[in-house]
Image: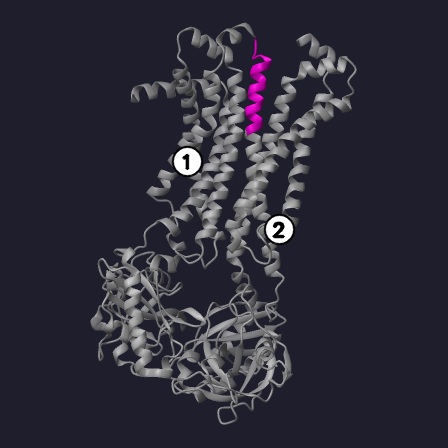
Amino acid sequence: MTGNLYKELQYAARSLRKKPAFALVTIITLALGIGATTAVFSVVNSVLLRPLPFRDPDQLVWVWSRRPDNNRAPFSLPDFLDHRDQNQTLLEIAAFSNIGLSLSGLEKTERLQGLRVSANLFQLLGVNASYGRLMVPQDDEPGQRHVVVLTYECWLRRFAGDSQLVGKTLSLNGESYSVIGILPRGFPLPLRGAELAIPLSPDSDPLRNVRNSVNFLRLIARLKPDVTRHQAGSDLNAIVRHQRQQFGEAYSKKTGINVVPLYEELVGDVRTGLLILLGAVVSVLLIGCSNLAALALTRTASRYQEIAIRKALGATSARLVTQLLSESLLLALLGGVAGLLLATFGVRALLSLTPAQLPRSQEIGVDARVLAFAVAASVLSALIFGILPAWQAARAEMNRALKLNSRGAGEGARLNRWRSILVIAEVGVSFVLLIGAGLLIQSFQRVQAIQPGFDPSHTVAARFSLPKSNYQNRAAVALFCEKLIPGVQTLPGVEAVGAVSILPMSGSANIIEFSVVGRATAQTDTYAAQFRAATPGYFMAMRIPLLQGRGFSEHDRADSVAVALVNEAMAHRLWPDGNAVGAYINIDDNNTGPRPVEITGVVGNVKHQNLETPETLDIYIPLAQIHEDNIGMITNSQYWVIRSKGEGQSVESNLLKELQKIDRDVATANIRPMEDYLSESVAPRRFSLRILTIFAIAALLLTVTGIYGVVSYNVSQRTSEIGIRLALGAGRARIFRLILGQGVGVVFLGLALGLGGAFALTRLIRTLLFGVAPTDPPTFVFVSLILLVVALIACSLPARRATKVDPLVALRNE
């Protein structure tokens, strides 16, 4: 059988050499279609299909605390220890939290994003070190030396892959940590962007028994064999019920546990978007194959005499089908090989467009599954564009083909019907893709029209980490700000400077609970708000407007009355009569209980997470009045915002020089324009929009080519008829309308098919839309008009050519 296939492919190669133009067009079309499809599939494969790089990943779950206003909340340290020690359904459970670490002692102090992890995390995940060893539970025990594990990428970037680094000591946050191991290449830590991990040491932490302490830990667990997520959830929920009975008010808002598969948590909500993009590129490939099928039908028709002669010499229909499919298979394999080469470059292009938030992006690449997909796509393409021409050839009537110099009118009409059917399908598919692209464009425009609540232009933000050894209390942090602000304000071109604990659009959040003083203290009267500590100049630097009252000043110090600013949404909701200024609220921002602060002003609403989230309740306090329990938070990470008239690079260099004068051990990171943060917040939407729009335009161009081909073929088949009509007195305008009408009729049938498909399929992209319905009438009307106009242009060119037929020449040929 292999020998027969080889002979068929040899014959196919000889046949195709006689028609190099047809072969070249087919290979290029398939290479582009298969290459694009394979590149997108490589992303889908790496993000959605490839198993997580952990041992028995199906047993791994992410554990969240459930509250009335949040189903995915973090845990406090005592919560973690209770679940660790009291559960009956988990093999292991590990906790982690993010931490900024200042790496000093080298040429410059650098802020690295790190994790504090319970030392059993890597054992739980089932991962081994590339060099050295990873943490073991003993590293969490009190009195153990400080150890650190680096990611492979951090090891290469920061230490040039020094093979002698394991065993050496690094200075992190002013303390010595021994490097014990390097993680495998591409291994993803649970929080994106983390570069190193240090032990959590929960049993020696001061918060070990503080029940109302801050919730900052996220949990990962491994289920025992034969234990389901539901059983684990019931087990952990029983622990929460016991906590509520034992500790009362401290646990009134902790209502239960959510157990989520780790895969689902890491992949997030990108599944729908990626599958839609894969469907879009497959649709483009199908449209390309439809065009090739129409082209192959024409080529097959020109070979009717050859096919008839082979039948007369004894060739069976099955043998003819096999031969023609061999030609399609050979072209598809050549196109597949070229497409696979293009896919390797296409993956790089996609990586340059993918947003930083895309999970598992470091794993994207071409592997055995992608290679198998490319082969399958090639074979399937061969069948799609080859089966119809082969079937038509097998049906050729031997006697008629031998008698005629070319196919008869009946054969031509039948072939044109098939070409028209293919074009109807192409129009329908491209209409659906154009509708999807139109809806995403409208959504993107509406998102970008939303005001973020601040002005990002001419503003640079820098992230600082202060060494804890030098900044152990609130007074030291306040003194650092008092020293740095005057120096930065005097820099050339600087208009305003300020600091804040968490920057808008930075991806971080800090939510606290509060109540209004003087109102009932029932559970329903406790609210949650975004919480920020800021210096007075922050609001001017960000151009966040002050709407009522007064802003912060240098007089708002640790020894003065505690004050706060609230945003407009909070003022309108809780004080609709407009008397928020002067009111008092109790904010729960520490480990000892709520404390009262006076509202001195109302500022504008700010979009903290992204432009699409609803308005939140926001509370700002002076950085100088931050509670001592939160000093670790503000030294670990604080953002400085500088508004200037000059270039960002000059501001950055001048800021670093000024910082060196104050404290050389302060680590810096992420010095970039605020416009970058705003751009990143819409990056996922921009990525989906760009890719789907590219595919929709490609589908439109291929469809136009198909429409043009059908009408042109029709003109060539009806040349004699057109000549007779003209000879009998038909006007050229009538001929133009006749040919144009046939093409437009095909387009209308395709539009009807596309409308039905669009109404059914656009609901799948509902989660990607913002402010626009999946069946938005203006989008449907606009896309329909675009398709009609383009189709009219494609039909008018061959129709115009038909009007120029010379009746004498047409009749002489007949």
Quarter holding residue 201: bottom left
Q: Which amino acid does label 1 sit on?
A: Ala
x then y, percent, for residue 745: 65, 30
Q: Which amino acid does label 2 sit on?
A: Asp
Question: If the image is split into quadrants, where does the C terminus sit?
Answer: top right
x then y, percent, for residue 680: 52, 61
Magenta stretch: residue 420 in it?
yes
Image point 38% across, 21% down: which residue? 9
The tag earlier along the polypeptide, 1 or 2, is 1
Q: Nearer the viewer, residue 793 or 260?
A: 260
Question: How many C-alpha atoms fall within 10 Å of the one at disc 1: few (<14), some, or many (≥20)?
Answer: many
As helix, strand or loop, the secondary structure at mark 1 comes to helix
Residue 336 against residue 633 in the figure, above or below: above
As helix, strand or loop, the secondary structure at mark 2 comes to loop
Residue placed furthest toward the left = 138
Q: Label 1: which residue? A: 377
Mark sitting on residue 776: 2
Image point 29% across, 55% down: which residue? 58
Q: What kind of colouring is applied to the model shown?
A: one colour
